[in-house]
Image: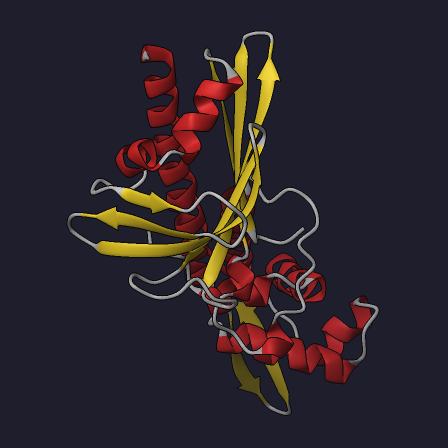
């Protein structure tokens, strides 16, 4: 039995634009809605929406510096998601191995 | 390109009919999936129950039965719950006859659609999700190194 991974994390990651936002933040170290909108084919309000979803899923954190809000990636949530997926894959590997054993013995 | 699916496969030195039986017959499924038996009404829409001594029962609903090549069901993401939209993932088995026996492939998908508001479900689950755990770990690693490298 393996529990399903944190749904809000996978829902947040499932959008290609959000994935780009997260990748850019990881590459640059941090970013603001303005700098991110400058590098993506979407508007600043759209970037703000995507950042809010990533924030709710615990994938980014924000810090206010003067007039701007800077976002950084929270790697521990990505690690947890990676572990969840690896656990699910391992569970299927074990089940497939059991089927293989039964099929080849009998 | 979303981390919404897991795909695994194995090559089995046995005919496809034998593998089909192991994947679909309750007396077999109850041993390799769960440890306390299973019930399977083997037709689209049919009810399934997968039982564990320790954990209880997981309910599922049969989606596809195309003997001996495709078997799919939707299983509930919580014990004792019904396998409804937003609370279940899809499991698909594909059996391919091979000169050496049978290639058995399993795909589990739909993690992104679990229990989240409809506006969050705009996922485009194209492409192969296998290896996503590495992808996520790489990104986490990258984010760490960038943060560490900053002055």
Residue B43 is left or right of residue B38, and the answer is: right
Residue A34 is left or right of residue B11, and the answer is: right
Horizontal and vertical percent position of residue A77: 43, 62
Horizontal and vertical percent position of residue B69: 59, 29
User: Coloring scheme of the render?
Assistant: secondary structure
Near-viewer residue (B98 or B43): B43
Horizontal and vertical percent position of residue A87: 37, 44
Residue at x 39% of width, y 65% of height? B82
Tell me: residue B98, above or below residue A87. Answer: above
Horizontal and vertical percent position of residue B7: 54, 38
Residue at x 53% of width, y 79% of height? A62
Residue B125 is left or right of residue A73, and the answer is: right
> Is residue B151 visible to the viewer in this orientation of the structure?
no
Q: How many labels does the image show?
A: 0
Near-viewer residue (B97 or B128): B97
> Is residue A94 visible to the viewer in this orientation of the structure?
yes
Residue furthest toward the bottom?
Answer: A67
Residue A102 is left or right of residue B112, and the answer is: left
Near-viewer residue (A85 or B12): B12
Tell me: residue B68, above or below residue A25. Answer: above
Tell me: residue B146, above or below residue B50. Answer: below
Residue furthest toward the top?
Answer: B99
Residue furthest toward the left?
Answer: B54
Check the picture and name the quadrant holding the C terminus of chain B. Answer: bottom right
Residue at x 20% of width, y 54% of height? B55
């Amino acid at each position: 039995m393996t529990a399903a991974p944190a749904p809000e994390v996978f829902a947040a990651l499932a959008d290609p634009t959000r994935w780009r936002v997260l990748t850019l933040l990881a590459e640059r170290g941090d970013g603001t809605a303005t700098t991110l909108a400058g590098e993506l084919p979407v508007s600043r309000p759209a970037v703000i929406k995507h950042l809010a979803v990533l924030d709710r899923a615990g994938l980014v954190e924000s810090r206010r510096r003067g007039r701007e809000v800077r976002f950084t990636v929270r790697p521990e949530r990505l690690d947890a998601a990676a572990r969840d997926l690896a656990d699910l894959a391992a569970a299927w590997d074990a089940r497939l191995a059991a089927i293989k054993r039964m099929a080849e013995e009998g | 390109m979303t981390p919404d699916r897991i795909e695994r496969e194995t090559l089995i030195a046995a005919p496809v009919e034998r593998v089909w039986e192991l994947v679909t017959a309750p007396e077999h499924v109850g041993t390799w999936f769960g440890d306390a038996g299973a019930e399977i009404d083997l037709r689209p829409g049919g009810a399934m129950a997968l039982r564990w001594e320790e954990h209880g029962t997981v309910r599922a609903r049969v989606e596809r039965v195309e003997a001996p090549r495709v078997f799919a069901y939707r299983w509930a993401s919580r014990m004792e719950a019904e396998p409804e939209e937003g609370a279940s993932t899809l499991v698909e088995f594909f059996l391919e006859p091979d000169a050496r026996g049978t290639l058995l492939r399993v795909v589990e998908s739909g993690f992104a659609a679990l229990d989240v508001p409809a506006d969050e479900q705009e996922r485009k689950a194209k492409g192969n999700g296998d290896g996503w755990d590495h992808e996520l770990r790489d990104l986490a690693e990258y984010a760490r190194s960038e943060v560490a490298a900053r002055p």
